[in-house]
Image (cartoon, helix red, strand yellow):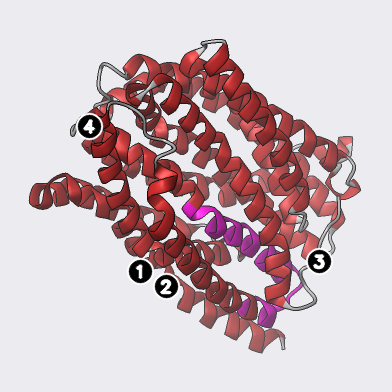
Amino acid sequence: MKTRDMTAGNPLKLIMLLALPLMVGNVFQQLYTVVDTIVVGQVLGVQALAALGADEWTNWMMLGIIQGFTQGFSIRIAQNFGAGDSRQLKKDVAASVVLSLILAGVLVVAGQLGVASLLRLQHTPEEIMPGSLLYLRILFGGIPIVMAYNLLSALLRALGDGKTPLYSILIACVINIGLDILFVKYLGFGIAGAAAATLTAQLCATLFCLYAVWKQPLLRPEKADFRLDGALCGKLMGLGAPMAFMNAIIAVGGMIVQSVVNTFGVVFLAGMTATGKLYGLLEIAATSYGYAMVTYTGQNLGAGKIKRIKEGVRAALIVAIFTSGIISGCMLLFGKGILSLFIQGTPHEAAKAMEIAYRYLTVMSIFLFVLYVLHVVRSFIQGLGDTLLPMVSGLAEFFVRTGAALLLPRFFGQEGLYFAEASAWMGADVILIISYFIKMRQLKKYENVSG
């Protein structure tokens, strides 16, 4: 693997060089769920598609917790890489591995014990409950694989390597598509086949990243590094736990929205699911800019280059807003054609689901720039080692999303739900923009003192 020092050179160029491979990789990673949805929707029909939709926020909550911990652990690694402290970096890697193993075991047990209750709390329709439950039980059984992949890819990104995760996802995506078609269409494994295909593909991505990490001396701890230091573990958990909690509470808000969506029937659920599956595509560039900003900010903070941090975050905001505009335009122009890939059923069912899906997509596209600002600013703050303010923004996102989902349908019917997501983004942005100016003032003081 090739590391990238982000403490010297043009900030925008460096951010883009890291973000672009992540972006392409995220496109193919989203194809995991997109292909699952297309194959299940086309082969098994609207009810099976609705079953996947009912799982979405529950699955996202588990994935968000995993990503929160692993991304939090990687912040210290980026900072120590920027500071040139390879000794401490290896200790951080070792502690991150041990903590991830423990957390994976806890999450497997919690997931299997709690999944049925979570689906019932969301008012999942009885006719799709068996399929929803089966899909999640299989995915949650593979949590150690998901944890390993996210930790390994986070370590690689912390050192500025966006290409290895990209290559791993390309390989896994091809495997996933082939196995989806084989398991669901030809072998008749149904929803279980889609889940098994996804886990198998993720295992391949994990093994590829593991090989790359092992080949990088900086990321290969020695035996002595695995002697756990309580203070170090506390620091890592102090970074990871708020991010995991933030993602979990955002997902709980999504579950509340899902519980309201489920009360409007299977066709409405299928339409919302179709657009929900495009959410990952809408967010791809935002997530990639966010990952790049965590690494860029962390490395430059470790190197004490405060002015570069400020230049980088401003450049990232400009390019993120520009990117969101392009994606929004494409969705408004070509969204119906893309949505048609997910929707299958009787002519009446398909037409109604398409109408619902496109209206929802239109609202999200119009407000997409708000989401892009959210990711860049939140990741900038996380890269500084502050995961508490982003957690507060997650709480704001939760309360606004929940309030909108519960109140808007009372006044506007089911169409009120189209605005719950965009409202949540705006709620989070209020906190983050205030936090942005606070952090900029703190950086200016630090720059004056160090300068």
Q: Is residue 377 above or below residue 333?
A: below
Residue identifier under label 2: 433
- Looking at the picture, how far across and down is residue 127, in whole percent? 27, 16
Q: Amino acid at mark 2?
A: Ile
Residue at (72, 73) in percent of width and height: 13
Looking at the rendered structure, which numbered label has been put on residue 348? 4
Q: Earlier in the sequence, mark 1 or mark 3?
A: 3
**Quarter of the image holding residue 181?**
top right
Q: Secondary structure at mark 3?
A: loop
302 magenta-colored: yes
- Looking at the picture, how far across and down is residue 71, in whole percent? 62, 49
Magenta-colored span:
282-310
Looking at the magenta stretch, what is its main secondary structure?
helix
- The Cα–Cα distance between marks 4 and 1, rounded to whole angstroms, is 41 Å
Residue identifier under label 1: 430
Q: Secondary structure at mark 2?
A: helix
